[in-house]
Image (spheres, helix red, strand yellow):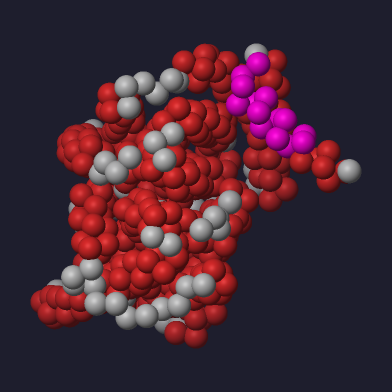
Amino acid sequence: MAGATMVSRVLGMVRELVYSAFMGTGAVADAFFFAFNVPNLFRRLLGEGVLSAAFIPIFKEKEKKEGDVAMWHAANAVICALFCATVAISIVVVLGVSVVLPCLPHDSDWRLLLELLRIMFPYVVLVCFAAVCMGMLNARGYFFIPAIGASTLNIVMIASVLVLAPLIGGPLDRRIFALAIGIVMAGFVQAAFQMPSLRREGYRFEWVNPWSDPTVRSVISKMLIGSIGVAAFQINVMLTQCMAFGGHNSKVISTFNYAVRLMELPQGVFGISMATYLLPTLSALAIDKKFPEFRSTLRQGIGYLTYVNLLAAVLLMSLAEPIIRLLFQHGRFGEASTEKVSQALICLSLGLVAFSTVNVFARAFYALNDLVTPMKISVFCLTLNLFITAIFLYGCHFGAAGLGLANTITAFCNVTLLYFALRKKIKTLELEAFRRQMPGMITAGVAAGLVAWFLMAYLDRQWGHTKFICQLGEVFLPMIAASLVYVGVTIWLKVSAAQDILRMVGGRFVKKQG
């Protein structure tokens, strides 16, 4: 699953590379990213969070206690309910935007944003259907197909820049509508991609009246409570962008967006993959009341996640500027944009492990059928985040770096409160073995960061960064050296996560050779 997510995230980075060269950072880019983040928030809430959290435990329970017929009936009821709800919401939003648009000046940034939003919002209907399909496949033991499905989305979005935008032509504020159309097309392709695997599992769509179905009532009630609990980071990003758009903080949204996309690469590859895998696994253990295995699985997941994402955070912080320069500094994206995005990336990377751990702890609560606790904690953290953002953005004028720092602070607050709440709920988390690993991982992380930074600085003095091959070396040579140092030090210090991963990789290599 991590491999499939890696493919998707790499294509997502290619998409951002194409986007950055196409529109850079500026008013048009800010309007597009803000407009896209409204329906995209639904994708993250549903595809990577709350729908799966609410639906998969019920789906698994139906499968275990009532059989396949009841299981597929429950799935159809949820699909029909979400279709009706999202179509109604989309109609209301599109009509509302259409009423407001004539009141705005033609050269208003808000007008462009709303015009883009009107085109993109129906994407919500498609992503809800895709989310249910992905949840069903995960519950049936399929993780690769749902994870690779996001790759189709990125391919269509890239094609909208390279193919559709030139066909539309005109200035940038006209060609940007090609990207909005591409997003809706991408949603359709991603939804359709899940269907062959579901049909092989025996799923057939049938209309089920959702209004009186008990499964629908249960799922919807949990989703309404849990939407804040699962997606604290995405809601944080959305609210802080609302505060930044249209004010004196020019280019903040597009600058912050590029940093978020880079930070989400390791978060998605391992953090989201681990959380997505753990939900049906922990749900099955909770249903069978196997709580020792529940704690053990959760402990291992957190250990592996921290081990991998700590290295990723160190590399992003140490090599932020050369990474941004290599990926994005083309076309309309200049040196000033590179500096600002790298500052935001450093501030976000400080919280990478916390962002990922929040996802895992939230899934543990959902597996235990508790949606209220993470929701309460997230409401508190969201309020705190808005307060800190206002200080950094308007009091200190930190710009996009301030947005990143505010999200990092609240992520650590969120994960700390979730930890204590979960420990209280299940008496003990038995994390002593994980805590014993932390000094070794931190030591290795510091060593890796120093190696990456000093080697990058040396290469910059020797080669400069005007040529592409020099930019490539300035990123990958320090990255490889630092990763080897990190792995070597953690193995030398006998960090169990490093030893487990080494044995797993070595065992698979031996099997292939055999």
Does the magenta portion include 5? no
- Work out whether 115 lies above or below 54: below
Question: Is residue 347 at least partly visible in the picture?
Answer: no
- Which residue is drawn at the image coordinates 53% and 43% (left, top)? 270
- Work out whether 223 lies above or below 266: below
Q: Position of residue 159 (x, y in %)?
A: 54, 74
Q: Nearer the viewer, residue 266 or 379?
A: 379
- Which residue is drawn at the image coordinates 27% and 24% (left, top)? 424
- Which residue is drawn at the image coordinates 42% and 82% (left, top)? 170
Farthest front residue in view: 66
Look at the image and give the residue range highlighted in magenta. 494-507
Q: Is residue 408 left or right of residue 326?
A: left
Q: Nearer the viewer, residue 255 or 35?
A: 35
Q: Is residue 130 left or right of residue 419?
A: right
- Which residue is drawn at the image coordinates 39% and 55% (left, top)? 65
Q: Position of residue 379 (x, y in %)?
A: 19, 40
Farthest bottom residue in view: 167
- Work out whether 191 lies above or below 494: below
- Work out whether 252 lies above or below 26: above
Does the magenta portion include 495? yes
Q: Name the main secondary structure of what is drawn in magenta.
A: helix
Q: Position of residue 343 (x, y in %)?
A: 43, 37
Locate residue 362: give its quadrant.
top left
